[in-house]
Image: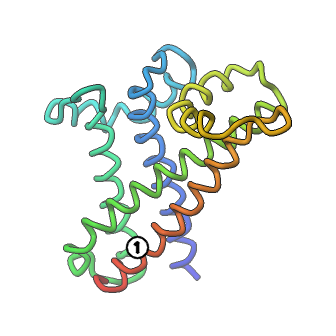
Amino acid sequence: MFGDVASFLLDTVFSLFGAVLLLRAWMLAVRLPPFNPISHTVFQLSNWLVLPLRKAIPNVRNIDWTSIVAAYLVALVYLVLLAGSTGASPLGLFPQALLVALLIVIKWALQLLLWTTLLLAVLSWVNPGSPAMGVAMQLTAPFLNPIRRAMPLIGGMDLSPLVLFVIIQVLLIVLARLTFSAALFGF
């Protein structure tokens, strides 16, 4: 029972922090203004890890590699702590842990996109004038715009968030299978 509780808490804390790091990189990629409350909060939550790493890892071509590498390092720490909470030896994880950590970061990114798309859809029905609506629209536009171009409005409704939601779910299923296979053969 303790192992299950520890695993749940580790998964929750590390997934949220990993999502914050990836959101930071995503916000910089779409050039979200740094002075809105959401950007400010994300920067404040992640500065303690990102700013020291930024001295060694530069940003290249509008990609915040520092935040992405930080998310990868957080995923590695998560795997080590998860192994420790289950009684496994963290050193026995090493070769496959590098791949599994990458898959975990991709999972966090897909889940972040899924939740942002869901937030956009809900806000469009409930409160389209919300300040968070503009942020969600700017973050999801690179993913929704190609779907919108390929798919016409149906009955005056934009179903692109639903299509993106389904695509993300399929990718998460494939990713879960890949992660299980990597973990099964490595751990």
Figure check: 110 above or below 156: below
Q: Position of residue 18 (x, y in %)?
A: 43, 48
| Residue drawn at x 54%, y 58% as measured from the top left | 12
| Residue drawn at x 70%, y 48% as measured from the top left | 162
| Residue drawn at x 50%, y 52% as measured from the top left | 110
Question: What's the colour scheme?
Answer: rainbow
Residue at far left of view:
56
In this rendering, position of residue 40 left or right of residue 48 = right
Quadrant showing the N terminus: bottom right
Helix, strand or loop at mark 1: helix
Q: How many marks?
A: 1
Along the line of sight, which residue is nearer the eye, 158 or 137? 158
Along the line of sight, which residue is nearer the eye, 143 or 41? 143
Q: Amino acid at mark 1?
A: Leu
Along the line of sight, which residue is nearer the eye, 79 or 118? 118
Q: Position of residue 49 (x, y in %)?
A: 31, 38
The residue that label 1 is drawn on is 178
In this rendering, position of residue 88 left or right of residue 116 = left
Figure check: 113 above or below 47: below
Q: Quadrant of residue 55?
A: top left
In this rendering, position of residue 110 left or right of residue 118 = left
Figure check: 102 above or below 158: below
Q: Position of residue 61 (x, y in %)?
A: 24, 27
| Residue drawn at x 40%, y 73% as measured from the top left | 178
Q: Position of residue 134 (x, y in %)?
A: 64, 21
Quadrant showing the C terminus: bottom left
Q: Residues within 10 Å of mark 1 (few under 14, many from 20)?
A: some
Figure check: 67 above or below 169: above
